[in-house]
Image: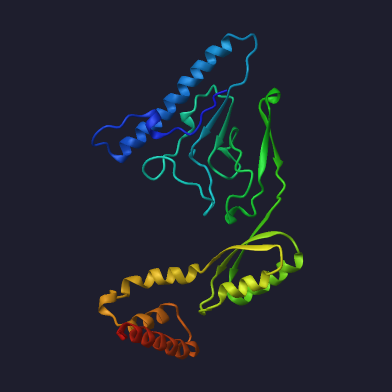
């Protein structure tokens, strides 16, 4: 068995002055290829010393070309540059079965049954909540027949996206199920809600539901899109900054008057404290 761990850059190549990113990537790929070739040749010599031929199994912790990921699954880049994706030609043909790790989704590489990622046994993010996890059982007596065995889900992960009315309605349904749930919530409403987290946590209080994350991505994206049009703080008064915050977040007119009064009161209080001896 070629039990190859994650290969670090410094383990398989030497750095040279004025190398380009492309040069580094090519040397990295060549180093990985030579490492597997050297080990496979050594394994072949060991095989010839035995009366029976044992199957050659190799492992690898890397990103193989064609591998699939899910957004937010936590798969990070492994090597220099954007990501060195290793081609199947990196691995010697005499490897009977290649067991790869790093990608979370169970999958075949290039539709080959003997080149696979078994995937993570547990969901690593809410994006994997609906993925069926599995372990692979390999029968070497049947030309490496591979059988997937589903892993039971012992902890439910769920995600809710929508405005506050939809979120609360879905929480009400989940509460009636009386089961342990890890929950991620994406608030996508346009109305500013001061007590968003309080409303959500109150809805699940006393239940087995644990809200692990609450995000407001739509408003964040909108702020980023508008940021190029905002002047620097030195050019704006506090009132103008507050007005732009209201505009960017598309605060309804019926909510603005009360918020403007509260901001003015807070600003006056702050100024009075700064002027007092």
254 or 67: nearer the eye? 254
Quarter of the image where one finds residue 33: top left
In the image, residue 68 above or below residue 42: below
At x 61% / y 75%, what residue is drawn?
199
At x 45% / y 80%, what residue is drawn?
250
In the image, residue 86 above or below residue 164: above
Q: How many marks?
A: 0
2 or 259: nearer the eye? 259
162 or 263: nearer the eye? 263
Quarter of the image where one finds residue 116: top right
Query: Is residue 30 in sight in this rendering?
Result: no
Quarter of the image where one finds residue 129: bottom right
User: Which quadrant does the C terminus fall into?
Assistant: bottom left
Tell me residue 63's x, y (percent). 48, 39
Query: Is residue 215 in sight in this rendering?
Result: yes
At x 33% / y 82%, what residue is drawn?
238
User: Which quadrant does the N terminus fall into?
Assistant: top right
**Residue pushed farthest front?**
277
Tell me residue 146's x, y (percent). 67, 33
In the image, residue 201 above or below residue 56: below
At x 54% / y 43%, what residue is drawn?
103
Tell me residue 14's x, y (percent). 32, 29
Tell me residue 244's x, y (percent). 37, 80
């Amino acid at each position: 068995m070629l039990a190859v761990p994650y290969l670090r850059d410094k383990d398989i190549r030497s750095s040279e002055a004025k190398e380009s990113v492309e040069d580094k990537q090519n040397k990295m790929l060549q180093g990985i290829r030579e490492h597997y070739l050297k080990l496979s040749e050594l394994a072949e010599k060991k095989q010839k010393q035995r009366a029976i031929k044992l199957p050659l199994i190799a492992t690898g912790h890397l990103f193989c070309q064609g591998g699939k990921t899910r957004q937010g699954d936590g798969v990070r880049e492994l090597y220099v540059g954007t990501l060195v994706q290793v081609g199947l030609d990196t691995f010697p043909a005499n490897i009977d079965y290649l067991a790869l790790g790093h990608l979370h989704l169970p999958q075949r590489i290039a539709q080959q049954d003997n080149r696979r990622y078994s995937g993570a046994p547990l969901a690593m993010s809410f994006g994997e909540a609906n993925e069926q996890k599995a372990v692979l059982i390999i029968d070497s007596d049947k030309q490496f027949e591979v059988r997937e065995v589903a892993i039971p889900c012992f902890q439910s992960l769920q995600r809710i996206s929508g405005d506050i009315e939809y979120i609360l309605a879905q929480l009400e349904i989940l509460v009636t199920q009386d089961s342990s749930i890890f929950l991620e919530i994406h608030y996508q409403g346009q109305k500013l809600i001061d007590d968003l987290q309080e409303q959500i946590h109150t809805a699940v209080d006393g239940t087995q539901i644990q809200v692990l994350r609450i995000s407001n991505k739509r408003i964040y994206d909108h702020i980023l899109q508008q940021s190029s049009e905002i002047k620097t703080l030195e050019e704006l008064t506090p009132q103008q900054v507050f007005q732009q915050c209201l505009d960017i977040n598309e605060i309804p007119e019926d909510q603005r008057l009360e918020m403007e009064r509260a901001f003015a009161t807070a600003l006056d209080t702050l100024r009075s404290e700064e002027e007092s001896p």
